[in-house]
Structures are given as C-alpha cells and as structure tokens.
Amino acid sequence: MSLDIRVKKADRIYHEGELVAGVVVVTSKGEMAHNGMTLALDGWVNLQLSSKSVGVFEAFYNSIKPIQLLSSSLEILRPGKL
C-alpha cells in the first residue's frame, strides 16, 4: 500500500485566507480494511534576523524556538474498506 498527498499548487507560499486544495491518493493491490483516515496540518514559523536588527536581537536569537501558528485535523475517511 502507498499513500500520496498531492497539493494542487505545491510550489507556492500560502497566505492567510487562501485555500489549500489537493487530493489523497491511496494505492493498494487489493481490498483493505482501515480504521479511518485523518489529515493533520501543523504550521510553524522560524524567526530570522534581518541585517538591520542583528545587534538588537543577537542575544535572544539562540533562545527563540519555532512558534506554532496553526494546528488542525480533519477526518477525510470513516472506518471501512478501500
């Protein structure tokens, strides 16, 4: 069995309010029972220093961890057979 998530516009940066669309492709040699499928989405941001702020934030830069902006899950298939 193989599973592939194909986003319609995979090579772009999405901004707030834009729709992310695509399909989940499951390939199997035969019929298969499953417990359902859930698609999970997590969005994180890493802060980057600009050349103007190097002196100001240098002391804090190493202690700043990535910030989670988004966390969501969606049931895309209920338990059954493929």
Image: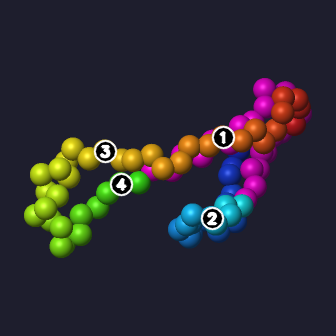
* Secondary structure under the numbered disc 3 in the rendered image: loop
Measured from the top left, where is residue 53 in percent x and y?
A: 18, 67
Tell me the SS state at disc 2: loop
Q: Residues within 10 Å of mark 1 (few under 14, many from 20)?
A: few
The x, y position of residue 61, in whole percent, is 20, 52
What amino acid is found at the position of numbered circle 4 in the picture? Asn
Verify CB contact (< 8 Å) between mark 1 and mark 3: no
Circle nearer the N terminus (1, 4): 4
**Residue in view at x 78 percent, y 31 percent:** 36
Q: CA distance from mark 1 to mark 4?
A: 22 Å
Mark sitting on residue 65? 3
Q: Amino acid at mark 3?
A: Lys
Mark closer to the chain start, 1 or 3 = 3
Quadrant showing the C terminus: top right
* Amino acid type, residue under disc 2 in the picture: Gly
Q: Is residue 32 visible?
A: no
What residue is at 75 percent from the left and 55 percent from the top? 23
Give percent across and percent down for residue 24: 74, 50
Which quadrant does the N terminus fall into? top right
Residue at mark 4: 46
